Image (tube, rainbow, N blue to C red):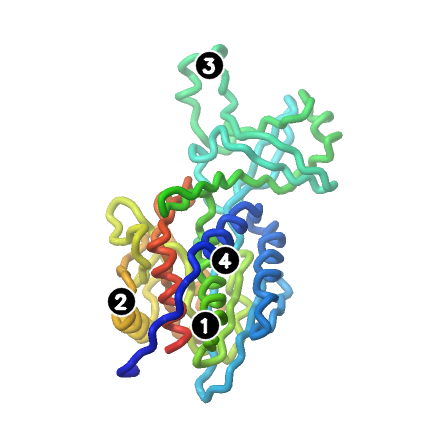
Amino acid sequence: MKENFMTLPTIDTNYLTKFLVDLLNIHSPTGFAEPAIAFVEKELSQFSQLQLTRTRKGALVAKWEVQSDLPPVALTAHVDTLGAVVKEIKSNGRLRLSRIGGIQWPSVETEGVWVFASKGERIRGSVLIDTASGHIHGGAGAETPRNDEHMEVRLEARTTSEKETRELGINIGDCVAFDPRVEVTNGFVRSRFLDDKACVANIVSAIRSMVDAGLSPTRTVYFHISNYEEVGHGASAGIPADVAELVTVDMAVVGRGQESDEFHATMCIKDGGGVYHEGLNKRLRLLAEQHGIPYKTDVYVFYGSDGEAFWRAGGDVALALIGPGIDASHNYERAHMDGLVATTKWIMAYLLD
Ligand SMILES: [Zn+2]
């Protein structure tokens, strides 16, 4: 701990917002996240301080090397999102889906989708219940369970049979991406998949702010941008063995019974995977207090993080989890600039400590 800690660099919130909105508008369900990885890679390539590499699994690793006697540290956040693949082509030409991660069916009923046909075409469609017409099914539509069996994709293409849909170039296993529906109003950002693109934007914004201010981290840092988090093993590989601490940057849970809100950053003490590292948590809390960063601590019930994936894979690091509050997660999510700025500041405070 230093007695006179430095003032943190200014954050360009217009840059943060624009980068986030652009990233949100790139479709990147787990397994099909390459366009989002490539977008982040291009953005980070403008900083000559960073050495960019890819893991074999396709994650992006940006190394900011500095002279220091201390071992390196790492931060991780993920660009992959919930989504779906084509499970079955129905006899009426519509698609049955298999979900990637835990998207909740009622939250995407009537949502627009793109089907990325493996032959290269991109075909528009929307998600409907199979009893959608009120003039046919009357009140029964409301009673139909919203599940894998009853939700289907209606394509904006002339098809009424399995054969015609296959002729469009659609195959079993093709990626289906839900529209994020991004909207920025009055400091709020509402969109699907703020988990975890908000945190990737926080990391990129922190790097940008430090570079603009002519500052470097106090020790070598690896930024690991994960592409397989939503299925549980994103950061299980790709964190170098000499890293001593890993800070996972991922959304905080907002809603009934939670301490987190959209206007603070949160440190998760315990989630579904257990308890994080007490020593690293203490340091991060002290930094937040020294820099006047609004933060909360919280416990998440149905949650696991990429940092825990690394721990489970045998990673020997001190591990923490911080991030901005996201309302209605894995549904139609919402963040606020105050929480995003608080998280970005916390990242900088950690890197400059
Ligand atoms: Zn996440």
The residue at the point 26 percent across, 83 percent down is 3
Choose mark 1 or mark 4, whichever is in front: 1
Find disc 3 in the rendering and name its residue. 134
Give SS at disc 4: strand
Ligand 1 neighbours mark 4 (CB distance < 8 Å) = yes
Among the two numbered marks 1 and 3 on one chain, the one whose residue lies closer to the N terminus: 3
Q: Amino acid at mark 3?
A: Gly
Residue at image point 31% right, 59% down: 266
The numbered dot on residue 78 is: 4
How far across and down, in percent of the image, does residue 134 sit? 46, 14
Dot 4 or dot 2: first in sequence order is 4
In this view, the residue in front, 54 or 264, is 264
Can you identify the residue that label 2 sits on?
A: 292
Q: CA distance from mark 3 to mark 2?
A: 54 Å
* Residue contact between numbered discs 4 and 2, judged by CB atoms under 8 Å: no
Quadrant showing the C terminus: bottom left
- Mark nearest the camera among 1 and 2 is 1
Of residues 125 and 144, the one nearer the viewer is 125
The quadrant where residue 156 appears: top right
Q: Position of residue 114 (x, y in %)?
A: 60, 37
> Is the CB–ligand 1 distance for label 1 below 8 Å?
no
